[in-house]
């Protein structure tokens, strides 16, 4: 197979994928520039690697296009969806129609009524909008599906890919006809995933206070601009403490809002649009932004009120005297 033939087969597979994609689903795109990059490769193997660097989602399609045994016309998009799920979450497709297990696999808990790749679509795609939204919410909370990558209540391809690992583990444990009929096996597996979400460990945010020298300079600038003098030691300490304390409050508020964003998603929130392509934290009524700088100026005005009033009076007297003197001497006012 030549590189040109590989690129043509890849484009055909992507075209089939886009035709079969769910309405509203993001479609794959191989731009002309990307196509030229592939055609510049000297071997099919290099072209496959290049395709995967252009877009990770091209991976399964590139492998299929490079395989001479792949019949493009009969390409099974469900198999590709499952293959992408395997690639993303580290599962291995044993090659059988069963998800994640071979036909002669003996599960530890018995029960060989395994879920198939076709049932990934037929059984769960036939569920009600509310049931599908419930599964999607569980997948989001388990870290298997991201907000904004699926249509709530629709058994679209991204939902199928995210759900494939649930059925893979169900088959590994073992599924009896009764468990398949009631869904008890996959529901118990889903509960385990929700209790132990997949994803990289997110380090807790660490509070870093403002630089001490920067705080000192900021306080000095306020006094020099407003009172034409440097702050006294106690004033410097007082205003510095205010700025540091308000900075801590602002950090704590941001952390509180971040916790609200991380709260579990429900099927109702998915269907009523509370959770869309972005997450909005719940903010208590009356909550306002915390501004450390504003708090510093407020404290400054509080402790220097009398001094500023006295200076203001002196400035008014001096201005009046200048006006009187200028009127006597005839100098411009």
Image: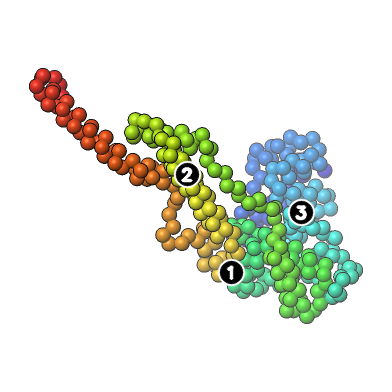
Q: Which mark is residue 256?
A: none
Q: Nearer the viewer, residue 36 or 112?
A: 112
Secondary structure category for the residue under label 1:
helix
The x, y position of residue 216, in whole percent, is 47, 35
Secondary structure category for the residue under label 3:
helix
Residue identified by numbered label 1: 267
Q: CA distance from mark 1 to mark 2?
A: 46 Å
Q: Nearer the viewer, residue 92 or 25?
A: 92
- Toward the left, the furthest residue is 328
Residue identified by numbered label 3: 87
* Sooner in the amino-acid sequence: mark 1 or mark 2: 2
Answer few, some or many: residues within 10 Å of disc 3's Cα (few below 14, many 20 plus, some between 14 and 19). Answer: some
Residue 127 visible to the viewer:
yes
The figure's colour scheme reads rainbow
* Sooner in the amino-acid sequence: mark 3 or mark 2: 3
Q: Nearer the viewer, mark 1 or mark 2?
A: 2
Secondary structure category for the residue under label 2:
helix
**Residue 71 lies in what quarter of the image?**
bottom right
Q: Residue at x 43, y 42 (%)?
A: 239
Q: Nearer the viewer, residue 91 or 214?
A: 214
**Horizontal placement of 320 versus 53: left or right?**
left
**Horizontal placement of 97 versus 271: left or right?**
right
The x, y position of residue 66, in whole percent, is 80, 47
Residue identified by numbered label 2: 241
Q: Residue at x 74, y 69 (%)?
A: 189
Q: CA distance from mark 3 to mark 1?
A: 27 Å
The x, y position of residue 180, in whole percent, is 76, 76
Quadrant occupied by the N terminus: top right
Residue 120 visible to the viewer:
no
Q: CA distance from mark 3 to mark 2?
A: 53 Å
């Amino acid at each position: 197979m030549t590189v040109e033939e590989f690129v043509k087969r890849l484009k055909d597979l992507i075209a089939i994928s886009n035709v079969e994609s769910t309405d509203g689903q993001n479609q794959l795109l191989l731009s002309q520039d990307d196509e030229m990059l592939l055609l510049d490769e000297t071997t099919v193997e290099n072209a496959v690697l290049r395709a995967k660097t252009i877009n990770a989602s091209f991976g399964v399609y590139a492998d299929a296009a490079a395989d001479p045994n792949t019949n493009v016309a009969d390409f099974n998009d469900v198999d590709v969806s499952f293959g992408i799920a395997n690639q993303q979450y580290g599962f291995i497709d044993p090659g059988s129609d069963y998800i994640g297990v071979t036909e002669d696999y003996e599960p530890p808990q018995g029960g060989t009524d395994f879920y198939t790749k076709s049932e990934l679509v037929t059984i769960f795609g036939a569920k009600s909008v509310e049931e599908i939204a419930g599964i999607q919410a569980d997948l989001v909370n388990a870290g298997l599906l991201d907000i904004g990558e699926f249509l709530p209540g629709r058994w679209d391809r991204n939902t199928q890919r995210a759900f494939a690992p649930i059925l893979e583990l169900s088959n590994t444990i073992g599924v009896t006809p009764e468990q398949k009929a009631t869904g008890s096996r996959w529901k118990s597996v889903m509960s385990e995933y929700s209790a132990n979400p997949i994803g990289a460990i997110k380090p807790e945010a660490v509070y870093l206070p403002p630089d001490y020298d920067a705080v000192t300079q900021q306080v000095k600038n306020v006094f020099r601009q407003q009172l034409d003098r440097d702050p006294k030691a106690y004033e410097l300490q007082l205003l510095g403490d205010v700025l540091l304390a308000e900075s801590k409050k602002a950090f704590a508020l941001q952390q509180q809002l971040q916790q609200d964003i991380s709260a579990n998603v429900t099927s109702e929130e998915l269907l009523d649009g509370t959770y869309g392509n972005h997450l909005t934290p719940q903010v208590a009524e009356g909550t306002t932004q915390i501004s450390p700088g504003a708090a510093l100026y407020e404290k400054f005005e509080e402790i220097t009120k009398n001094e500023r009033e006295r200076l203001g009076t002196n400035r008014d007297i001096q201005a009046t005297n200048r006006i009187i003197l200028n009127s006597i001497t005839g100098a411009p006012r």
